[in-house]
Amino acid sequence: MRSLLALAACSLLAVLPACTQTKIIRKNSPPPVETPAEEEEDPIDVEPETDPLVIDLGEVEAGKDVSFEIPEGALGFNITVEGKVADFDQNRPFGIQRITDPKGNLVHDAFTPKGGTKETSIATFDVIASASVPQGEGVPKDLTGKWKVRFGVYGSSAKPKLKGQVRVQSSGDGAFHGGALDLYVHVPRGLQIGNRTVDASDAENDRDVSERIETFFALTSNLLGIEKGKVVYSEESGDYRELDGVEALLRGFSVSSGQKDGTQALHVLLTNLIGDQGRPFAAGISPGIPGAATIFGRNVSGIIVTTSPSVDNDVLTMLHEAGHFFGLNHTTEFDGQSSDPLSDTPVCDGISRDELYDCPDRTNIMFAAGAIDGPVTLSPMQKRVYRGSPIYRAFNAGGGSTMSFAPRAPARPSAHSLTRTFRVSGSDVLSPVERELSSGFCGLNALDTSGMVARHGRDQAIVQLTAAAADADLAPYIRGRADLALRALGAK
C-alpha cells in the first residue's frame, strides 16, 4: 500500500463505503477532460419531498442538468451525489461538476467553487461527493428560486447514473438569527489526554474533555453565533484510540454508524494517533470540503481530532477541521500556488519561505498551520459558508428554530485569545523546514518532500528534518512528519 501521506491531500484518496471490504485508492489526479460539445437539454425538474428542506433528486445521468427549487428563507444548502461501486473508476471519480443559480450564473464549475483553485466536489474518501452553496464567490444573497446541478465524472465523459440529494438550511426569512449545533463526541476506551487516561464510559463528566467541548462552543458562539446544542458522548472501542493507516482512518470517519440520516449534528472522534507507519502525521482531519452533511456511518460522515496536553491546540484543531467539514478551504496552501475561493480572506504570498508570523492570515481559523496568533478570526464570507450548512440548527426570527429549540449558552470572551503552539515548552521559533511541517496538523495537507528539496536543497532539507525528528519538544505530528519525510528521501 502506498504511503497514506501521499494520499491524504484533498481529493487524492477514494474508497468504498465502510460496509464493504474492497478498497479503491485513486493513485493520481488526472487533469480534467473537456467533454464533447452537447446540445443543450432542458433540465430535469425535481419536485421536493414532503419536507421542503430535503430534496431528493433521484437517479440522474452524469452530464445532464437537473433542476430543483430552493424555498424562501434559505441560508444555504448542501448537495450530495452517490454512485454505484460497480460504476466507480478509481482514476476517474464522479462528483458535482456544476451548480447554476436561478439567474443562470455559475457558482460552481469544473468541480470547483467559483473563485477556487482546487477541485473539492469529487469523491475522495467514499463513493459520495459533496458541495455546498455558499462555498465560493458569486452566490446571490437571496437563494430562492430554481437552481440547476450537473453531476459528472472527473477527467472522463462517462455518464453513469448517480443519486443526488439537496439538504437545505433555513431560518425562515433568509437572515441569520443564530443557531445551535448538536455535537456527538466519540471517545475510545483508553484515550489519553496529557498524562491521564479518560474514562470513556463517563466522558461527559471528565474535566479535560468537558473543557475542550465548552471552549469549542465558546468559539463557535463568539465567532459564528452558533451556540451549544445537545452534546452526546459515545464510548467506543479501544481500537479507535490509534488510527494508523488508511483502513483505520476510514473506520474513524464512519464511527457515526447507526445514527439516523437527516439528523442535524456534527460527529467528532477523539483519538491519540492519526498515523502512517506508526508515526503521527496529523493532529486532525476532515474527509472532505465539505463533508456529507446529515449522512452518517460513511467515510464522509465526521471529523477526527487527536488530543494533546494543550486545550488551545485541540480546540483550534477541532474548529479548523469542522470548518473543512462545513465547506471551508485553507486560506493559503503551503504549495504557494493556491488559496481559498473567498475574496475577503487574506493570502500569504510567501508562505513557503517567510516566517509564519508575518502571514496576514495567521489569525484565521483556516490558516494552513492553524490559527497561530490571536485573537482568532473568520472573515464575513467564511462565516456565511459556515452558517449556510445544514449541519447545525438555525434559529428562526423571533427566537424559534428550524427543527427544535436549544437554549443558548453564555459565550466565553477569553476564547478569542486561543493560539496554537508547536512546542511543548519554550519558544515557537521554527526552522524553515519545521514551518512547512507545521502545516501537517491538518491531515488534508500532503507531505511535500520534493518541494522541500527544491526550496532548501536536499542536504539542508535532510539536516533540518533530522533535527526535527529528534526534537522531543516539538509537537508529535511535526516529529512524525519529519521522520516520514526522511524515509521518503531514503535518508533513514
Image (cartoon, rainbow, N blue to C red):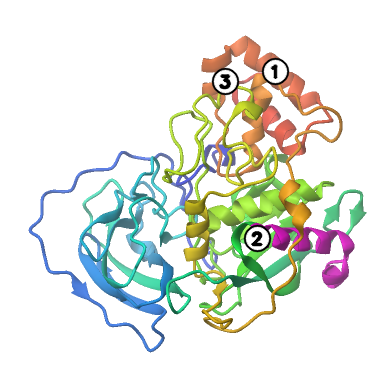
Between marks 1 and 3, how big is the CA–CA gap?
15 Å
Left or right: residue 157 compared with residue 112: left
What residue is disc 2 on? 220
Determine the CA span between mark 3 and mark 2.
Answer: 32 Å
Image location (x, y in percent) of residue 100: 26, 60
Residue nearest the viewer, comparing 448 with 247 = 448
Q: Which mark is residue 464?
A: 1
Q: x, y percentage for residue 462? A: 66, 16
Q: Which SS does the magenta portion mostly show?
A: helix
The correct choice, above or below, for 127 with respect to 364 in the image is: below
At x 80%, y 50%, the residue is: 311
Report which residue position mark 3 lands on: 353
Dot 2 falls on a residue whose secondary structure is helix
- The secondary structure type at the circle numbered 3 is loop
Neighbour tally class for label 1: few under 14, some 14-19, many 20 plus, Cα within 10 Å: some
**Rendered residue at 69%/38% (across/down):** 373
